Amino acid sequence: MVSSELKCSLCLQMFVKPVTLSCGHTFCKYCLLQFFLRRSLSCGLCSSEFVTKHPFDLKVNVVVNNVCRSLNTKMFLKALKTQAKEMKASNLEQKLLKKYPLHPDSCSEVYSTWYREQIGDQSQMNRLQLLYAKFMQLIEILRPYV
């Protein structure tokens, strides 16, 4: 049995790719991204503001992730696979981009620098098309590591 301290308050299951917000509450990354899509960038428990500028800035809490994986590897890997399928099927990343567009003034330094490098001197429409294409390439490159 998994301790209630190692369960996500949103899905009520063991953490998978847990992220810890500045308020100290921890959720599955997938669950929190779904929450951000339905509501706002705030904690699902205490409603405190999410201090990172974009949902894609969430970092997995490696220690909690490893503890959950070691407690029940089979269940953890099954949940990880299920969440990955659901995320892809629901087009969650594209929906989040639509609700929270990446912009040089509102996104993290990594995305801001990447955005400026990709855009160059293109016209406004070409810039948006190029940005979307390059961003999707970046997501595909990073997918195995997230």
Image (cartoon, rainbow, N blue to C red):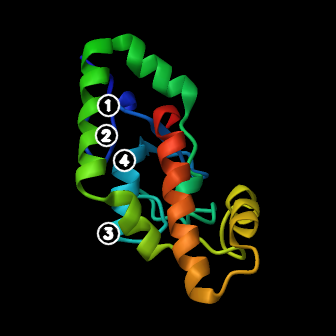
Residue 36 in sight here? no
- The residue drawn where x is 40% and y is 53% is 32
Q: Are marks 3 and 1 in contact (CB under 8 Å)?
A: no
SS at mark 1 in the image = helix
Q: Nearer the viewer, mark 3 or mark 1?
A: 1
- The residue drawn where x is 53% and y is 42% is 141
Where is residue 114 drawn, in percent x and y?
A: 71, 60
In the rendering, which numbered label is found on residue 80?
1
Q: Nearer the viewer, residue 31 or 109?
A: 109
Of callouts 3 and 2, which one flags the residue occurring earlier in the amino acid sequence? 3
Type of the residue with mark 1: Leu
Q: Are marks 1 and 2 in contact (CB under 8 Å)?
A: yes
- The residue drawn where x is 37% and y is 33% is 16
Type of the residue with mark 4: Tyr
- Determine the CA span between mark 1 and mark 2: 6 Å
In the rendering, which numbered label is found on residue 30?
4
Which residue matches tag 3? 38
Where is residue 71 drawn, in percent x and y?
A: 36, 12
